[in-house]
Amino acid sequence: MRFSLKYAPTVVRLMVGVGLLLGGCTRLPDSAPTTTPRAGHPLRWDAMEKCAEPRFEDGVAKFEFLVTNTSDHPVKVYYIRPTCGCTTVDAPQMPWTIAPGAGGTVKATVDFRGKEGEIAKELLVGTVEATQTLAMIVKVPAMSPAMRQQNQAIAAMNRQKIFQGDCAACHATPAAGRLGDDLFAATCAVCHESKHRATMVPDLAFAKERRDAAWWTRWVEDGREGSLMPGFAQKHGGPLTPAQVESLVEYLLAIYPTEPKKN
């Protein structure tokens, strides 16, 4: 099996599951108690950690953090950065100067499509005083057996159907702008790395035949007739551009075995 250090973080992620498993995430009330983020820091947030328990069909979890400058001087926030690409931030324009006694709101949206279990994401808030960390925990619900069977039945009739209608939220939309390991995590892991992987979905870690770049490209672009595997290339109505297909094939060659295991 060939391996590239380029993809080491993803290997760890896939070994522990698509999401970072945590214990006991409970929903916080809308008005959480004030918490001091760090001794002496002038910015105080309504909470340094918040949890969300969205519905499976929501696809995203939304968070809102309230901040107050408790000092007697202005505090300048130079950046508010998410720690991964599945999180977007809605905040005042940077740099953001907060006057004494004033405050504001920072909103964030975590895209959990293709993930299961409890996942943790962070926002890094940069000031001269110190970098603060806001934690967001999402308790991702599992797809119901009835919904899973319904989706499989739809795919059996038309395997490209997963890129249309409600199915697109999990199988097409997350692919936008992603490459390599991020693309795999967003579009492939939902089926191939799921804890509840369907029996008809092949285990990519097991090679039955030689798998070179042409082999992977054919499977990614065209899928397989008579199965649930769709063609992900745009020429078949899928979401992937040629550049995305190339990056995904490079990742697959680096992370999965290319030769069948000898007895």
Image (cartoon, helix red, strand yellow):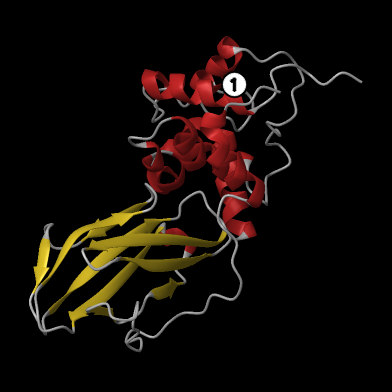
Secondary structure found at label 1: helix
Quadrant hosting residue 118: bottom right
Residue 158 appearing in the image = no
Say which residue label 1 marks: 253
Amino acid type at image mark 1: Leu
Q: Could you tell me which quadrant the C terminus lies in?
A: top right
Q: Residue at x 36, y 66 (%)?
A: 133
Toward the viewer: 121 or 174? 121
Quadrant hosting residue 98: bottom left
Look at the picture and state if 29 lies above or below 144: below
Q: Residue at x 56, y 23 (%)?
A: 223
Q: Where is residue 124 in the image (x, y as percent from the top left)?
A: 32, 60
Q: Position of residue 182 (x, y in %)?
A: 45, 38
Quadrant hosting residue 188: top right
Report the number of discs.
Answer: 1
Residue 170 appearing in the image = yes
Toward the viewer: 15 or 102? 102
Q: Where is residue 134 in the image (x, y as percent from the top left)?
A: 36, 68
